[in-house]
Image (cartoon, helix red, strand yellow):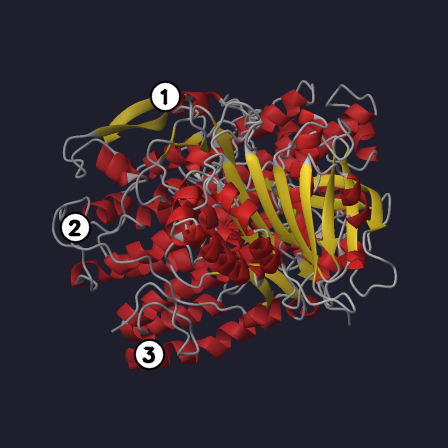
Amino acid sequence: MVDLINVSYDTQIPNNVGLSEDRKVLKALEKWHPGYINWWNGLIPEQFQKSQVYLRTAVSVDPKGWASFGYVNMPEYRWGVLLAPQVEDRKIPFGEHKGEPAWQEVPGEYRNMLKRLIVIQGDTEPGSVEQQRFLGLTAPSLYDLRNLFQVNVEEGRHLWAMVYLLHKYFGKDGREEADDLLRRSSGSDEAPRMLGAFNEETPDWLSFFMFTYFTDRDGKMQLESLAQSGFDPLSRTCRFMLTEEAHHMFVGETGIGRTIDRTCQVMNENGITDPYDINRIRELGVIDLPTMQKKLNLHYTLSLDLFGQEVSTNAANAFNAGIKGRYMEPRIDDDHQLTNDTYKVWDLVDGKLTHHEVPALTAINMRLRDDYVRDAAGGIGRWNKIIEKAGIEFEMKLPHEAFNRKIGVFANLNFDPEGNLLSDEEYKAGVPQWLPNKSDGDFIQSLMVPVSEPGKYAGWISPPKVGIDSKPGDFEYVKLHMA
Amino acid sequence: MTVASKQHLIDPEICIRCYTCEMTCPIGAIEHDDNNVVVNADICNFCMDCIPVCPTGSIDEWRVVSTPYSLEDQYEWTELPAQEDFPSSANESETGIEALDPEMAALLAEAHKGAGGKAVAPASAAKPVINLHTIGKPAKATVQGNYRLTAQDSDSDVRHIILSFESDKFPVLEGQSVGIIPPGLDEQGNPYLPRLYSVSSPRDGERPNFNNISLTVKREDGGVCSNYVCDLKSGDTVDVTGPFGATFLLPEDPQARLLMICTGTGSAPMRAFTMRRQRTVGEKSGGMTLFFGARSSDTLPYFGPLNKVPEKLLKKHMVFSRVPGQAKEYVQDRLLSEQEDVAELLSDPNCYIYICGLRGMEEGIERSFTSIAESIGLQWTTLRDAMREEGRYHVETY
């Protein structure tokens, strides 16, 4: 009898899907495995590969077992294939097949659509590890270093999750796609990652925090909608990935919050009340709030592009087919088929932004993006509370959705962060105040010095309020390998 | 009357609203609005499924409350309320919560198992505060003194250690324990868990109103924590968790009689009880009887000070097992030779029994009690179970 809760270690690949009894897939995965390890070893600087990192590893998919903490050498991390427990009698929750039993095998008519969605999701996972590969060298503390590696190993595991689905359900072309996931590389000229945001650099820790807050949150929304899928193995995979994804949101939200907190603290200590007194603030070795707003503008708008066209027949087809649902599908009060519903999407009429109604089925992307915007706004409010508590007059804001877009109705139009359409000259003049430029990047880069003494933090960021796994403040989250 | 209960809460300042806990909760006890994620006290059964899945640690918050915070209360919070002050309104004995950390609760359950059933606090005991300080947020104490209690030339090194809490509140009752976290890591590279030590000072402090406590600690060969504690110097700072324990407590009723039996550092709570009585009833009859076993007078902690406590406050039986030229005598032997007095205490419905010390002492004491109970026509196990359920029989052994 296959144990579907506890992770089995009887094969090279930890899993709860009975791999040892599934010889064909096991063989295929074992063949893929060395390529993965090569990819990992070539990516993360060697001194970290040899360090002991305090990581969590899932030892089972029930709540008590999925966060087992201990020191791990990263190349020996137990990447594995973990699916949330099967729900008995699960039905397809939406689309034209709504109410039919969930598919345990790939329905032939949707094979290509499913494969494409899995490949796109799978492509983002190694992409982000590639983008973040050098950050370890400038980590502001051992705590942050540990969080970076936790994010990295889990993105690696998410790649495994997608690769398992490709190997198990898509035969030869699935295996080819799995190989391509290791062949493409972030920022590469010949074989870049599939989505734009995953080819951008993550040059510094503030960018990393912004990325985990804004871009990983797109990942969360995508996983949420795939977790609704009528294809049950995909749903179960994504459900388990979501529990891990929450940690990435946490790293982003608290990382930005701690950076803001430190800036406010240093401003107060030096009697600076004007948040725009940028030079003085920077001289004190902290990142001024307006620069953080610029970073926010950039990462938020790049992430909005990940949702694709507002009106999309691909998204409509995937919904109708029961392959990809909506955020919190079971909580939405409608027919879950969208036969007569409409949804408001942005439009541009005579240079003016308006909303207009379109069939809801075609507006699936827009709806998910709206859910994303709401979800992303929560953290902004909590950051503003930090600023308010410090008595500084400044408010972080999400820019208008029209600003700095490359995809969708606003693509390549000159909107300012308030959503006003500008002339080319006006826009050009405004950009330095809205988006980070090279000198902003250079300044942030100049603060990126590694701190490796337990319990100590770089001067530009505050310590966290609570340790990982309730560890005390001076806990040695990474035992660095000394060459 | 309000009954205290333990409530599970989420720290809104730390929570990032990922709702993973809500999705994980098997019984739907967690919900959220646009502001906060909250736990419904009527539903939550402390299954702890939500604890490991939380990425932030904000989920691991607990309060002992007289009235649970409602969902509406929790939705309004921007920060977690402080633990309410308890000394007078809650009754831990009715909730049976000794500690909120599972590890500490397990240690106390193990220590109390010699009582033969679920421990119950004396009905008139003051209401303890528990778990105010956790492993993640220990109280900082400064060492005020560290004195050897046993003779310099004896091979037993038992110490009296006084800890002062500067700014941290640390309300502790006689009979409660605290956890001490030794610095450093164990062989697996994990930080040490706290070790529990019974407090040997009364509730108002080793020195009244100085916010300090005393501990009685014996140095054990190779013992990480006991060596750490025994080597502490004045001015050192120590991480302290707790207080823990909600049943091994002193009845407030001044008429209550106490029969205390201890060995070695098991004398710690007995000292606390005695000092509390001394401070509250003065030199009047304390109604307390102590059987204290040691190898010899120079290994018996507090031998000197104990001798100065008047007999009418505390009737003392100091029993030695290794005095040259004398027959070995253990506490159970002395119980038998004082059979008449002990029998009178056993039959008094206002008598409370406390046993504390090494686990090995239990068996001999049980045998003596069985024999003494028989002599007055009672079956010991029945009497013991009745006493325990009335909060009158307490065992803490290790």
Q: Give residue B168's quadrant in the image.
A: top right
- The quadrant of the image that shows the C terminus of chain B is bottom right
Q: Is residue A327 visible?
A: yes
Can you identify the residue that label 2 sits on? A91
- Give SS at disc 2: loop
Considering depth in this image, is A322 or A112 the residue closer to the camera? Answer: A322
Residue A375 lies, with reference to residue B107, above or below; the image says above
Q: Secondary structure at mark 3?
A: helix
Q: Is residue A353 above or below residue A21?
A: above
Chain ID of residue with mark 3? A
Residue highlighted by disc 1? A354
Instruction: Give the mark nearer the N terminus: 3 vs 2.
Output: 3
Q: Marks 1 and 3, how far apart in space?
A: 57 Å
Label number found at residue A20: 3
Looking at the image, is mark 2 or mark 1 nearer the viewer? 2
Q: Secondary structure at mark 1?
A: strand
Amino acid type at mark 3: Ser
Relative to residue B114, is residue B173 drawn left or right?
right
